Image: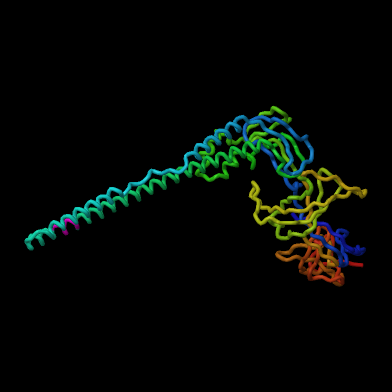
Amino acid sequence: MIASSATAVLVLAACSNTPAPDIRTARVALGTVTEVVQAPGSVVARATATVTSPTAGAVAAVLVKDGVKVKAGALLLRIASPSAQAALVSAKQADARASNTGSVSVGSVSGGALDQADVTAKRAFDAARTAAAAIPDAGLKAQALTQIATAEGQYASAQAAARQALAQANSGLAGINRAAQSLADAQRAQTRAALAAAQATVDALVVKAPIAGTVVLGGVSGGSSPNSTSSLLSQLPASVQGAAQSLLGGAGAGSNASVVGVLEVGTPVSAGTSLLTVTDVSALTLAVSVDETDILTVRPGVAADVDFDAVPGVTYTGIVTSVDLAPTTSSRGGVSYVVRLSLDPGVTSTGERAPVPRPGMSAVVSLKVLTAKDAVSVPAAAVFRDGKRDAVWVVEGGVARRRDVELGAQGDALIQVASGLTTQDTVVVKGADKVTEGMQVGTK
């Protein structure tokens, strides 16, 4: 919705001889016109972090008081968790067993027997050839040598087949060795991942401030946390999450509960239980919801006035820092965009510094999307819509004449006329709906 504020040096000349008291005219003047887009907003802290319990247990020590300011990394509390300690011991034992397994090998088949057979065969064939050479009959000698050569060839073929079979057997055994080693490596990877998760859970039992800010103990809505075991497990490879979960004994089961009331020593907690929040209010910003009909006029650098219901009578100021590209759709189907602004300190009417708003406070933000200085301007009541054109009634020689105009910045009180009028013109500024073309309208 567009609203506006406007300031102008506009001298209105009320007419003493108008035909009706409801019709008034005025000379067009120069003024400053500010077009404003009003939108609802809320205060946003610089950062807010919710700290949750990493696992089931009980509060062993609360090291800070409610409402104190802490630095990032400051110790906040300790959680006692026998189940987490037991899971760590179990994970260490499983990893040790996997480490002791070492390399896996099923050996290979030796070719020593084939080598020995080659030696024996060579001796036999040599002896046979020596004996054949001693045969006096040339025909019988040739026949014997032929038989020896044939037998030697058959032996060579059989030996080659045997060595090929041996190579295939050893190749198969090598594949088995590789598969067995891969399995052992995978098991070790699983135990190491489970050990890392268990160790991280135990380390997280000493809760530290994730950011600098003000601590609020207990009483916050629950949710998962980067410190929780569930989150740690989710960061592991999918192939090892199941093994890690089983080795942790289910310690990663999440919970959306929150501590209600006072957080003190002995308070039982579950994995994911919200323990406290840390809020950094060193810099406050505004998140404003601007309707789609107005968003195209909003850009970084636009100044704004901010009014809080909680601080009546005080106006704060801000500057647009960013405009979201992604829209937000309401339950009624309306589309809006989030605009983010810096928030400057407010000043009271007496010149004193106004109270600092709290995160979550609602505000009405007036975005000054367009300002025209020394602009030809008329009161907003002077402009009317005729079809698709904007127009005014110009008084010429005491007679009303319709004139089309192009508008610029549109304020609540004043509207800039970009073209169609000059400061020499007189226009109807009240009762324009009662004027007709050619109507007698008196002026001073």
Asked which quadrant contains residue 154, the reply is bottom left
Residue 269 falls left or right of residue 282? left
Determine if the magenta segment contains residue 151. yes
Q: Quadrant of the C terminus?
A: bottom right
Q: Residue 10 appears at what percent x and percent y?
A: 89, 64
Q: Is residue 19 among the parts visible in the rendering? A: no
Query: Which residue is farthest top?
Result: 266
Residue 154 falls left or right of residue 396? left
Residue 99 falls left or right of residue 28? left
Q: Residue 167 appears at what percent x and percent y?
A: 32, 52
Examine the residues drawn in magenta and state their main secondary structure: helix
Residue 347 falls left or right of residue 273? right
Q: Quadrant of the N terminus?
A: bottom right
Asked which quadrant contains residue 206, the reply is top right
Q: Is residue 135 among the parts visible in the rendering? A: yes
Q: In this view of the protein, which residue sits in the foreground, 129 or 439?
A: 129
Q: Is residue 303 above or below residue 360?
A: below
Residue at (50%, 44%) from the top-left corner?
A: 239
Q: Residue 157 appears at what percent x and percent y?
A: 22, 56
Asked which quadrant contains residue 28, the reply is bottom right
Question: From which residue to which does the magenta span run?
Answer: 147-152
Q: In this view of the protein, which residue sits in the foreground, 119 or 14?
A: 119
Determine if the magenta segment contains residue 71. no
Residue at (80%, 69%) from the top-left corner?
A: 401
Q: Is residue 11 above or below residue 254?
A: below
